[in-house]
Image (spheres, rainbow, N blue to C red):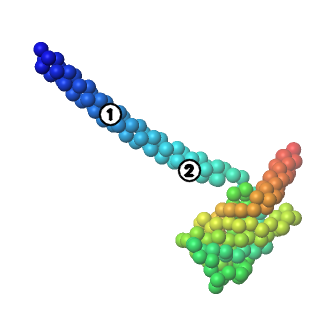
Amino acid sequence: MNDNILVALVFVILSLITLIIYFIFEYKRHLNQKDVQIKKLSQKIDDFDKRLKEKDRRNTFRIEANIEKCKFQILKIGDKEIDLIKGRIGLGIIKDISFTGLRLESEFDLPVKDVVEVKLEFEFDNHELELKGLLLRKEEHINNKNFIYGIKLIETDARMQNHFNKIIRNKELENRRNLIRGIN
């Protein structure tokens, strides 16, 4: 009878061990499924965030500027500071401007395959500004010998960025007031 109890006890212990191992594997499988779901949701959130930022960027109002005198200087192309063109000044016309960027027209054919960082100096609404930006795109038009560049502003000086934002805000308010006055 003791042998029967011992056999039953070993059977129960082995059954419990088997159940524990089964539940551990099931729990691990369940965690792996949750990890996959979390990764998919994270990817969806990232995609949604990118679309939202793109939409915000596109919806940022643009002020027609036609600033005739804009000096620009290439600071970096890719990871390199370019000594050959460093210090050389290009001229351009700012076609429009917003909080996040501007459109610059110039006769210079600048590369846009690499990341190109530029420093821009211009006067806007009686304020001298010096901002940094990245060339995002280049447009070439058949009926225009100049190139038009989309530039994303990357100002690192918080005081200059705040000053610039205030100027843009004030100009937009002025434009709205003029529009309302023109309608009435």
Camera sees residue 19:
yes
Q: Amino acid at mark 1?
A: Ile
Q: Amino acid at mark 2?
A: Lys
Residue closest to the eye, 60 or 13? 13
Q: SS for tag 2?
A: helix
Question: Is 108 located above or below residue 39 in the figure?
Answer: below
Q: SS for tag 1?
A: helix
Task: Give the quarter of the image for residue 101.
Answer: bottom right
Point 67% across, 74% down: residue: 75
Of the image marks 2 and 1, the number of the one nearer the N terminus: 1
* Rendered location of residue 81, percent (x, y): 63, 77
List the residue tagged with mark 2: 50
Q: Is residue 24 left or right of residue 71?
A: left
Camera sees residue 139:
no
* Rendered location of residue 21, percent (x, y): 28, 33
Point 41% across, 37% down: residue: 34
- Determine the residue located farthest toward the bottom in the rendered image: 84
List the residue tagged with mark 1: 24
* Rendered location of residue 180, percent (x, y): 84, 46
